[in-house]
Image (cartoon, rainbow, N blue to C red):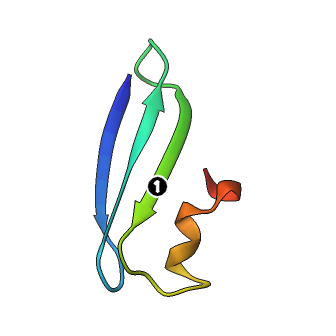
Amino acid sequence: MLSPVMGKGLWAGVWGYIGLESDGRTISGAVFDHKSETPGLGAEISKDFLQ
């Protein structure tokens, strides 16, 4: 099951999806993205090492 998530970044919104196991409580994965965050700071959320 995928659950969309959204939040407020410093310059613009951030969003992503959290993958949940069938029990609805265990996270199986997460991906995030942004439109315009500061390089080296908020922009890091779309890097592989954080997903």
Residue 4 placement: quadrant: top left
- As drawn, is 9 to the left or to the right of 21? left
- As drawn, is 48 to the left or to the right of 4? right
Whole-percent x, y for residue 37 in the image: 43, 81
Q: Nearer the viewer, residue 43 or 7?
A: 43
Whole-percent x, y for residue 11 in the image: 32, 85
Numbered label tally: 1
Quadrant location of the N terminus? top left
What residue do we see at 62% from left, 62% from top?
Answer: 47
Which residue extends farthest top? 22
Whole-percent x, y for residue 14 in the image: 35, 65
Which secondary structure lies at badge 1? strand
For disc 1, the neighbor class at 10 Å (few under 14, some 14 to 19, many from 20) is: many
Which residue extends farthest front? 35
- As drawn, is 10 to the left or to the right of 49? left
Whole-percent x, y for residue 20 in the image: 45, 26
Task: Inspect the image, locate mark 1, and give the three-letter code of the amino acid beneath it.
Answer: Phe
- As drawn, is 31 to the left or to the right of 36? right
What residue do we see at 46% from left, 55% from top?
Answer: 32
What residue do we see at 40% from left, 20% from top?
Answer: 24
Which residue extends farthest right? 49
Which residue is denoted by mark 1 in the rendering?
Answer: 32
Residue 46 placement: quadrant: bottom right
